[in-house]
Amino acid sequence: GNSVTQMEGPVTLSEEAFLTINCTYTATGYPSLFWYVQYPGEGLQLLLKATKADDKGSNKGFEATYRKETTSFHLEKGSVQVSDSAVYFCALYSSASKIIFGSGTRLSIRP
Amino acid sequence: DAMVIQNPRYQVTQFGKPVTLSCSQTLNHNVMYWYQQKSSQAPKLLFHYYDKDFNNEADTPDNFQSRRPNTSFCFLDIRSPGLGDAAMYLCATSRAGSAPRKETQYFGPGTRLLVL
C-alpha cells in the first residue's frame, strides 16, 4: 500500500542556514504529494504540492520536486528564518479521498 | 476569503459530559473530514463525509459521532469524553471527483479539547 517516510526530527538550524527535510514515498501510480506546515497551536496549512512526476511545488521560499526515480519529495529552503520554526508534514494522496501523512518533522531555527 | 472555520478554538469539558465541535466551510467542497491530533503527531483520520455519505475509519471509537446537515457544516460529537480524548481536533475539506488522486485537503485552525 501507499506510505510516506519522513526524516526524523527535531531539526535545529541557525537563521539563514540551508534546510532539507527528507521525504520518500511508496505509491501506485503518481498521486499528488504535499507538504503541510503546522505552527504552534494552529491547524495544518498547505505549504506546497506537486501533482505529477517532475513537478516542482514552491511557496514562501520553500521548494520540493516530485521525483519518481528516487520516489522522493524533499523539502528545501535556501535561507531559513526564525518564523519558519514549525512542524512539517509530508503527505500523499492515498485512495478514496484520503491522504497519508508522514510522522512530521519539528524544525527549530535559532536567531 | 474562502476558508475552513472551526469553533470554538478551545473547548473545556468534563469527563463524561457530551461535547460538540463545529466546522464550517466557504469553499463549497463536497468532502469534509475530522482528524484527531495529539502532541504534534500526524493527524489521525476519524471519519469523513463524501457528500452525504458517511465513511467511518475502522479504528474510530463509537464514542465519536459526526453529523453533516448541509454542504457547509459538519459537527463532531463526543458522547462521553474521557481523559484520553484530550487533543486537537482538525476539520478539513476537499473537492473530490474532478481530478482523481489529485485532491488537496484544506484544514481549519483546529479546536483544542481539554477534558477535566
Image (cartoon, coloured by chain):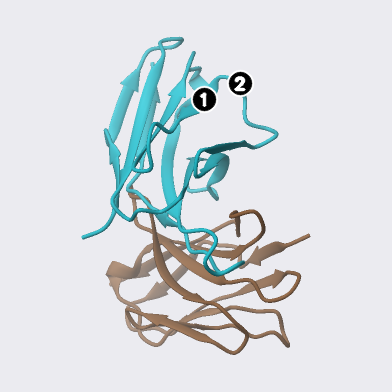
Q: Say which amino acid is labelled 1.
A: Gln
Image quadrant in which the N terminus of chain A is located? bottom right
Q: Say which amino acid is labelled 2.
A: Asp
Q: Residue B65, labelled with which disc?
A: 1
Instruction: Check the residue under mark 2 and report the chain it is in.
Output: B
Residue placed most toward the observer, B54 or A85: B54
Query: Where in the figure is residue B111, as x and y percent of width and height?
Result: 34, 37
Query: Where in the figure is residue B77, as x and y percent of width and height?
Result: 44, 23
Instruction: Check the residue under mark 1 and report the chain it is in.
Output: B
Task: Please name the color used to draw chain A.
Answer: brown
Q: Which residue is pictured at 38% across the width and 29% down the height?
A: B113
Task: Please name the color used to draw chain B.
Answer: cyan
In the structure shown, which secondary structural element does the residue marked by tag 1 occupy?
Answer: strand
Q: Residue furthest top?
A: B16
In the structure shown, which secondary structural element does the residue marked by tag 2 occupy?
Answer: loop
Residue placed most toward the observer, B93 or B80: B93
Instruction: Tell me: residue B63, above or below residue A23.
Output: above
Q: CA distance from mark 1 to mark 2?
A: 7 Å
Query: Where in the figure is residue B47, as x and y percent of width and height?
Result: 56, 38
Residue position marked by numbered label 2 in the rendering: B62
Q: Which residue is pictured at 33% across the width and 83% down the height?
A: A16
Instruction: Inspect this view and state whether residue B39 appears.
Output: no
Residue placed most toward the observer, A74 or A81: A74
Q: Quadrant of residue B48?
A: top right
Q: Which residue is pictured at 73% across the width and 62% down the height?
A: A2
Q: How many marks?
A: 2
Q: Which residue is pictured at 74% across the width and 69% down the height?
A: A26
